[in-house]
Amino acid sequence: MEITNCQHPNHDSQRIKYVCVDPQCSIPKKIGCADCFLDDHITHIRKTTTQFKDFVNESIQQINQVEFQQASNSPQKDLEKQIDTELDSCMDCIKQKFNSIKGDLKGQIDSDMIKISDNCTQYQQNMNNELEPFKTTIRNDLHILNQTELNSLVKFYQEAPKIHKHYSKAAEQIQEEKQKIKQKKQKYLAKMRSIMQILLKDFNELMTSKNVQFDDCFDYETPQKQIMSPNKMINLVETARSSRRFPMSQTQKKYFLAAVTKKLE
């Protein structure tokens, strides 16, 4: 049964009307009639029971309207996605650089190969033009040739070794040019390998260097971090010394950093 009247013997069964909402109130009984509040809560903040219930109900409804949206991806997946994006960007940049080197090499090789092809065509055409008349003339009997034709054959006979040497030399030069192109390809390939080795070496040194202090990347220390990095320790000591007008010199910093690093190891 709900009690709506005050049970205090001296309060004439007045209607329970007020609720104390004062944050500083230490009285256990927070609800009462007008006389109760005159006795115990005269200076306290109070609300009528109706006002109190209305406020509580409105607050419940207001708080209940807060929606918690489910995360579509876990923080770990979001982090993995960000890492993948950064790695893809880095790999694209590296790939672009190597493609640029490959493009330069291909352009030079294509240009050189076109020159070689043109030279081959020109030498072949010159040789054909020079030999074709003799191929036709030599098919005939020598005694039916006129003096000019015979003299041309005689001259060819005399100069054939020289002509052969000339075109053989040209063929060798073309082979040498092809070899140079092959060497150029190997040179660029070695250059690309060297660049990759340098990148991997620098990356490994960066990731394994004792100078890389991941906790220095943060502006605060979590309760779990019990070990202070050497750089922060130097700053702390230097701050203390500076306050006493005894700052650390560069040499002192160097020795102190070496000692702290060795100690942490």
Image: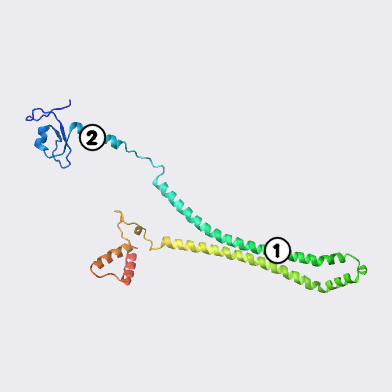
Q: How far separated are the C-alphas under marks 1 and 2?
A: 95 Å
| 22 with respect to 114 (left or right) | left
Dot 1 amino acid type:
Asp
The residue at which mark 1 appears reads as: 118
The residue at which mark 2 appears reads as: 55
Residue at image x 33%, y 67%? Answer: 257
Residue at image x 66%, y 67%? Answer: 177
In the image, residue 207 above or below residue 57:
below
- The foreground one among 124 and 157 is 124
| 12 with respect to 132 (left or right) | left
Q: Position of residue 173 (x, y in %)?
A: 69, 69
Quadrant position of residue 237: bottom left
In the image, residue 190 above or below residue 8:
below
| Disc 1, SS | helix
Q: Position of residue 146 (x, y in %)?
A: 91, 70
Q: Position of residue 47 (x, y in %)?
A: 17, 35
